[in-house]
Amino acid sequence: PITLGVMGGGQLGRMFVQAAQEMGYVTVVLDPDAASPAGAVAHHHIRAGYLDEQGLAQLMQRSSAITTEFENVPAAALLTLGAQRPVAPGADAVAVCQDRDAEKRHFRASGVPCAPWALIETAEQLATVADELLPGILKTARLGYDGKGQVRVADRAALAAAWDELGRVPCVLEKMLPLALELSVIVARAADGTLVHFPVQQNLHRDGILAVTQVPAPEVSEALRQQAVQCAQAVAQSLRYVGVLCVEFFVLQDGTLVANEMAPRPHNSGHYSIDACDQSQFDLQVRTLAGLPLAAPRLHSCAVMLNLLGDLWFDAQGTERTPPWAQVLALPGAHLHLYGKAGARPGRKMGHLTITAADAATARAVALQAAALLGLPAF
Ligand code: ATP
Ligand code: MG
Ligand code: MG
């Protein structure tokens, strides 16, 4: 049997492992956490850090090909592995996605618009930053996710204070844009250049974390959908990307499409594809890694995905509870995915719920019922 390896043991790794196992692959996960969601379901779990030489050597020995499940895997580790085994996505592509400045330069080079920005690595750059970038958002260039490592700044004084607060690490200052809504597009590209995509996803964020994804995107014109898909394809092609790539977009109040950031892996906004498409984003990750042909995925149901954060495991008094799954699962088209994480904490991604239906209005109506049962706000 062929063994597929994955760097990282979170929920994305878990769903990759599950898709790979369905196709008969043996799976191996590298993650230091003994209780990692992917390690718990993989055939083999190597408990070591991403730069641990012995861990990497074991992963290499066991795997025919290796992928990653989060963007902060050290590019150096991917380079080491890539010298011996097929690694998808490659170290170069992952390195671009790990650095917001490199990522924006790549968008621009691909002809894809993004927010005006400046790189801030020195006090001098901070002092001379253009006025037109304020008010803005200061984001650490590396390692941020779920809105962490970001501070909204109204003026120069706030900017200087924010840079201190972030530890004076390299940052980008992005102009604050007037958003109408947020979208994402997930593409998969094979080594031979074949490129397929999922439908445009409309995303709602709360407190910097994805809360709701709706497919088809209810408020997006066909022309804008095509534009978003073309942009995501251009970004993948110019990176000569191999694997699954997600590009996040803003639609501005004047209707302009602007790329926000990208993720070199399956994405939270693509989880609906497990239940609503004939192939999921994880199935396509398996195919790109194993060198199998890519066929275009087809959306067979309308879908609304609700992210299930740890907050749901606590009542208003802060007492731990089990969310009312039985009531939720009584709804038609409800698909519950829990990641097997032990400790619920506010903001922690514990699972997701996808509601599928034959039409968008039903999917949305049922998802609103599910949200009400769970105590989540309407959308
Ligand atoms: P993720 O978990 O998606 O990786 P992240 O921490 O990398 O999140 P971003 O996607 O950069 O964060 O930003 C989080 C959210 O903040 C965006 O989805 C959007 O709602 C808002 N935001 C980010 N940049 C801007 C901007 N330039 N103008 C307006 N809103 C923004
Ligand atoms: Mg991000
Ligand atoms: Mg984001």
Image (cartoon, helix red, strand yellow):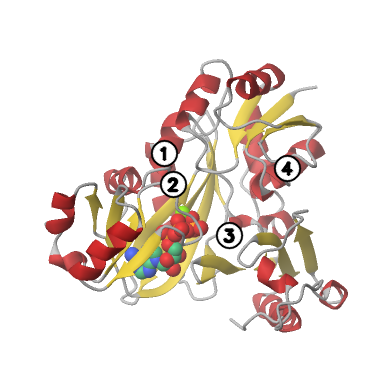
Image quarter of the N terminus = top right
Asked whether mark 3 and ligand 1 are closer than 8 Å, the reply comes as no
Q: Which of marks 4 and 1 is nearer the N terminus?
A: 4
Mark seen at residue 38: 4
Q: Earlier in the sequence, mark 3 or mark 2?
A: 2
Indicate the amino acid at tag 2: Gln
Q: Is mark 1 on a helix, strand or loop?
A: helix
Q: Name the residue under label 1.
A: 237
Depicted 65 relative to depicted 353: above or below: above
Crowding at mark 2 (Cα within 10 Å: few <14, some 14-19, many 20+) = many
Mark 4 in CB contact with mark 1 (< 8 angstroms): no
Do the residues under discs 3 and 2 have CB atoms within 8 angstroms?
no
Residue at label 3? 269
Label 3, label 4: how far apart the Cα atoms are: 19 Å
Q: Nearer the viewer, mark 3 or mark 1?
A: 3
In the drawing, does residue 106 fall left or right of residue 203? Answer: left
Query: What residue is pinned by disc 2?
Result: 233
